[in-house]
Amino acid sequence: MKPILGITMGDAAGIGPELILKAFAVHGLDRCCRPLVIGSLATLEFYRDRLGIPASFRSVGSAGAARYEPSTLDVLDLGIVDVPRLKIGVVDSNPGKAAVVYTQEAGRMALRGDIDAIVSAPLNKEAMRAAGYTFEGQTQILGELAASKRYGMILLLGNLRVMMLTTHCALQEACRAVTKERVLGMLTLSDESLRTFGIRSPRIAVAGLNPHAGEGGLFGREEVEGSVPAIEAARTAGIDAVGPIPADVVFLKARDGEYDLVLAMYHDQANMAGKLLGFGEVVTVIAGIPFIRTSVGHGTAFDIAGRGVADEKNFVFAIEKAAELASLKKG
């Protein structure tokens, strides 16, 4: 039986609702999953009418009440969004709050086993902060909800997989985070995650932080004092980890199949590699939580929201990957 995917609507002022409408009206993704949108029915109807995308909806009170019929998209209508006052493409606390609530409800449903995986449309961090939340993003929302001690984000692009040592923080904070304990923890998490992907003997490369991976301490001590001891400890524990390898070559080696995953040191190091090799095709997966969650590799795109020009391809990839991983998990 096809997996049930809980699809969170994201920030209503962004392109999330449009991505959902296009993914199912144009691509017929009910072929790979049973979709349940978690969000605002009134918002979806608003964008359907505004953009002229043919779609019909059914409001349901739970995943168990959904019918999952090809002609109708089931919606767990949590409301919250003040649609008459919605300002498309503008940071606002109302849709910011709604996006967080949708994500949290999806997480609770996944923990209960009501859904097999989550696919997240993007939320806006500024709007989320305006609503009073201090989360770095959806990774932290779901990681804390699941009470996971260690979690992280993996970027997927074809053969390229990238785990981030740090995510949304200042670069100076990312540099301070390159410690033996943190690097070893993320290497362990990476190894565990790759095995859930069906990779029996994962090969993991650690990217350097400094130019030329520090040149033995000439250009910074982070590698010598943090990455190298962590790699040695990981290898002692049976993890096939190598590095640190200069960031200007390690991602190409991974793309060509030499490694199964690269542990990047900071957010932009990981994202620049992925987006240069295939912008619009990157899918993110949260590692370290007890359920599957995928999302897109881009944000809310307020600059084009409500115009009908958003490219849903990345969102389609995220849905397909979630369905694939959920089916793999169910055996």
Image: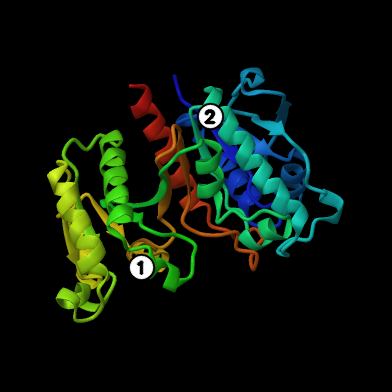
Mark 1 → mark 2, Cα distance in angstroms: 31 Å
Residue identifier under label 1: 269
Q: Which structural element holds mark 1?
A: helix
Q: Residues within 10 Å of mark 2 (few under 14, many from 20)?
A: many
Residue 323, picture quadrant? top left
Amino acid type shown at disc 2: Ala
Which residue occupies 26% across, 77% down? 220
Which image quadrant: the C terminus? top left
Residue 312 in the image: x percent, y percent? 53, 52
Q: Residues within 10 Å of mark 1 (few under 14, many from 20)?
A: some
| 256 lies above or below 225 | above
Q: Which structural element holds mark 2?
A: helix
Which image quadrant: the N terminus? top left
Residue most extreme to the bottom: 218
Amino acid type shown at disc 1: Gln
User: Between disc 1 and disc 2, whose residue precedes?
Assistant: 2
Residue 63 in the image: x percent, y percent? 62, 23
Residue identifier under label 2: 110
